[in-house]
Image: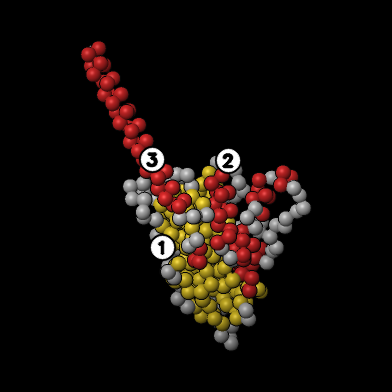
Amino acid sequence: MQYEICLVIPLVIVGFAVWIDYVTRQLKRIEAFRERLLADNPRYVTTGFECHCVITTLNGDTQKVRKAMLAVMPDGIRLYPSVRDMEKYILLPSDSLRWFGRPVKYHDQRNELWLHLEEDGCWKLVKLTLWRPSMQSLIRALKPIVSPELVTAYRRRRPYVHLGPVVARPAEQDIYGAWSLDEPLSLYVMPLYVVILRGTQVLRLLPLERIWQIAALRRLDAPEADGLVSLNFEGEKLAYAAKDYEAVAAAISEAAKRSLEAPVMQKQKKKDEYDDEEWEEWEV
């Protein structure tokens, strides 16, 4: 027994030494790669592979990245998911960004950022998680490369309205009051738009600030059928039949109201009089 223990102990020590050497070499590779990224003058680079990411194409696939190095470059956010092949990256282009926001106030655990992108005719929802200091640095780096309208939307009060995608059918009413329904599509409500999709393809974007007269209606010609979501978009009257028509109409109405709200205004205080949340909202 003692002889076997004498054999095992050296093997454990050697194995531990090999593991330490491997980790050390990996950390050196990661730091060397980060230095290369910093040489390209990015706005921000995480210190390591600390970013978790979920990319969902509406009505399509979901891609999960368990660990990635994140860099904010002039063309957008780059995610480097592979330690073995660091040259490969996933680009979230800044010119494809349609909204970004943190659904929860800053806290000391991993913080989440949601981004909406319209890319290659598809609508993508990206959820990034980072530790608090990294998330604050990311937000500060992101604001200057996006439009002022998106920064204004970011500063609006929570909660942010999201609903769908919901299956709906475009509806038209004849002169006798009967409704005819077209082929099904999807409605997705988010803080700035109602996104209309067929499959994964975006058919139309309805900016919420241009929508009014939103109503949930029962069909008099078919009381047992799905109800209708009715709205006026820049003078164009639209209607969609949906199973949860009341919830859809309520979400569009609430999101439209919030899209017109002014952002949280800066108060005349010194920096040390703000809490972290207030100050970050105004720090560029």
Q: Quadrant of residue 27?
A: top left
Question: In the image, which is nearer the foreground, mark 3 or mark 1?
Answer: 3
Instruction: Give x and y (percent) for residue 51.
Output: 46, 48
Instruction: Give x and y (percent) for residue 85.
Output: 33, 50
Looking at the image, which is closer to me, 64 or 181?
Answer: 64
Residue identifier under label 3: 28
Q: Amino acid at mark 3?
A: Lys
The disc placed on residue 108 is 2
Looking at the image, residue 42 sits to the left or right of residue 103; the answer is left
The answer to whether 68 is drawn above or below residue 156 in the figure is: above
Residue identifier under label 1: 60
- What residue occupies the far right of the structure in this picture? 268
Looking at the image, residue 75 sits to the left or right of residue 270; the answer is left
> What is the C-alpha distance between the residues marked 2 and 3?
28 Å
Instruction: Give x and y (percent) for residue 145.
Output: 55, 61
| Mark 2 or mark 1, earlier in chain | 1
